[in-house]
Image (cartoon, helix red, strand yellow):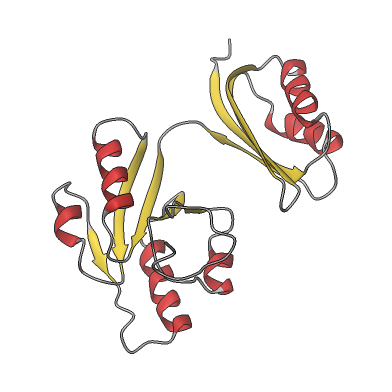
Amino acid sequence: MHSLQRKVLRTICPDQKGLIARITNICYKHELNIVQNNEFVDHRTGRFFMRTELEGIFNDSTLLADLDSALPEGSVRELNPAGRRRIVILVTKEAHCLGDLLMKANYGGLDVEIAAVIGNHDTLRSLVERFDIPFELVSHEGLTRNEHDQKMADAIDAYQPDYVVLAKYMRVLTPEFVARFPNKIINIHHSFLPAFIGARPY
């Protein structure tokens, strides 16, 4: 007798009609229960995003093959065990977003393990250390952007995170840095701007 597992299916693909029905029908065909489902369409890029938490007995290769046959060309889908994710947070000087993450993780409102906080300034060290979380300084002084991003990436890799979270990290990332963490960077800057317009957008 197989025990039930819980996994998270993430789907990214070109938007078109009927995607939710196609994906959920395949899950039904595999006798998987949908525990939670969230979807979003980025109308600017025409991309569809869906996160589906599933419970049941999984045949990963067959499920993913069925999804591949039903989804449009250029789709990305991944299936991972559900559970706490390990994150590294990147910061500059502002405490607002970081403080919110630290409080929510500490009191159970955010189900993550914060492995470390890494900053290019030392300003937020005392806040982070109050939560018994390592703070690492990787200063950008005297370095080119590429050199600094390389040092940041090496520091992040040491903690082996599932995701890298930018909590008002006020630096533009190089393409090389982004490519080193594919589909693993989450930006929680305070607003969705049409373009980066500087440290004081208001």
Instruction: Give how far across and how far down residue 4 sits, in percent.
Output: 55, 16
Task: State which quadrant residue 65 falls in.
Answer: top right
Q: Please state which of residues 158 and 116 is positioned toward the viewer in this rendering.
A: 116
Task: State which quadrant residue 11 falls in.
Answer: top right
Instruction: Give how far across and how far down residue 122 sits, in percent.
Output: 21, 69
Which of the image's four quarters has the C terminus? Answer: bottom left
Query: Which residue appears at 84% of the width and 42% of the height?
Result: 72
In the orientation shown, which residue stands out farthest toward the bottom?
Answer: 142
Which of the image's four quarters has the N terminus? Answer: top right
Q: Please state which of residues 118 and 202 is positioned toward the viewer in this rendering.
A: 202
In the orientation shown, which residue stands out farthest toward the front?
Answer: 202
Task: State which quadrant residue 117 falls in.
Answer: bottom left
Indicate left or right for 48 with 136 as reference: right
Instruction: Give how far across and how far down residue 110 sits, in percent.
Output: 36, 35
Indicate left or right for 121 with 166 as reference: left
Query: Which residue appears at 45% of the width and 82% of the height?
Result: 145
Query: Which residue appears at 13% of the width and 49% of the height?
Result: 130
Labels in figure, total: 0
- Relative height, residue 41 to residue 171 (above, below): above
Q: Please state which of residues 143 and 64 is positioned toward the viewer in this rendering.
A: 143
Indicate left or right for 153 with 119 as reference: right
Query: Which residue appears at 73% of the width and 53% of the height?
Result: 45
- Relative height, residue 94 to residue 14 (above, below): below
Instruction: Give how far across and how far down residue 8 sits, in percent.
Output: 57, 32
- Relative height, residue 55 to residue 107 (above, below): above
In the orientation shown, which residue stands out farthest toward the top?
Answer: 1
Indicate left or right for 104 with 179 as reference: left
